[in-house]
């Protein structure tokens, strides 16, 4: 089990107690990628992170490891990643496994905090722009729809038709422009 000393993790534990949560740390639903290495092996298995807390996470995968198995992991949530050592604490055949993080360094704890904050923002419907402003997901979707409509209007000033590939390319170009504006 990981030992925690950051004020961020202490605050999360206090919030969980006040909300009546039976776990020490609250879990946050999130979708991310997981790369898992069994100890002693150089090849990895891939899975999907479906929730995360300060003490561990759940990874969906077809062939979960057995309870007690030590492993190395790398989790990627949006543009945030976190890696370290863990142990399997529960397992559901053909579905996935729960892992507890172990022996986190200060840097790993910092990266985990960033992942938790990302998950909190996603769960609350907030996205953070590089300038630190929080926009709701609905506001961002509306802005994206307006941008696509504007680009399409520009297109149809010069063209009579738009193929599916042309539309896809227009949306991809717009997405590349937006990546400079938002952390998605």
Image (spheres, rainbow, N blue to C red):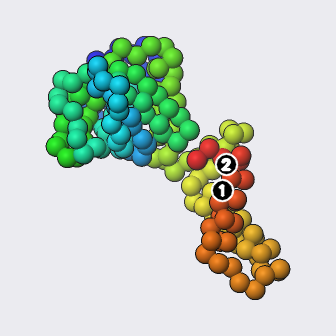
Q: Is residue 165 above or below residue 119?
A: below
The residue pinned by badge 1 equals 175
Distance between mark 2 and mark 1 Cα atoms = 6 Å
Q: Is residue 100 visible?
A: no
Q: Is residue 37 above or below residue 139?
A: above
Please identify the quarter of the rendering in which residue 24 is found. Answer: top left
Left or right: where does residue 135 sit relative to residue 18? right
Instruction: Give the mark count.
Output: 2
Q: Residue at x 69, y 79 (%)?
A: 162
Left or right: where does residue 55 sit relative to residue 135? left
Q: Residue at x 78, y 82 (%)?
A: 159
Q: Residue at x 43, y 34 (%)?
A: 75
Q: Is residue 117 above or below residue 153?
A: above
Viewer-proximal residue, 142 or 156?
A: 156
Q: Which mark is residue 86?
A: none
Q: Give the image location of residue 31, x and y in percent.
A: 42, 46
Element type at marker 1? helix
Mark 1 packing: few (<14 Cα in 10 Å), some, or many (20+)?
A: some
- Pointer 2 with pointer 1, Cβ within 8 A: yes
The residue pinned by badge 2 equals 179
């Amino acid at each position: 089990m990981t030992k925690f000393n950051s004020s961020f993790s202490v605050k999360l534990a206090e919030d969980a107690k006040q909300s009546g949560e039976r776990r020490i740390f609250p879990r946050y639903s999130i979708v991310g990628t997981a790369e898992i290495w069994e100890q002693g092996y150089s090849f990895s298995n891939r899975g999907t992170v479906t929730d995360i807390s300060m003490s561990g996470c759940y990874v969906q995968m077809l062939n979960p490891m057995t309870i007690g198995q030590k492993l190395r992991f790398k989790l990627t949530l949006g543009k945030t990643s976190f890696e370290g050592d863990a142990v399997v604490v529960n397992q559901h055949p053909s579905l996935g496994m729960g892992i507890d993080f172990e022996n986190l360094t200060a840097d790993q704890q910092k990266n985990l905090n960033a992942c938790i904050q990302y998950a909190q923002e996603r769960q609350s419907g907030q996205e953070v722009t590089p300038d630190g402003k929080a926009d709701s997901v609905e506001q961002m979707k509306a802005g994206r729809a307006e941008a696509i409509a504007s680009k399409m209007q520009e297109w149809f000033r010069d063209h009579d038709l738009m193929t599916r590939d042309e539309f896809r390319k227009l949306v991809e170009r717009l997405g590349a422009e937006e990546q400079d504006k938002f952390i998605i």
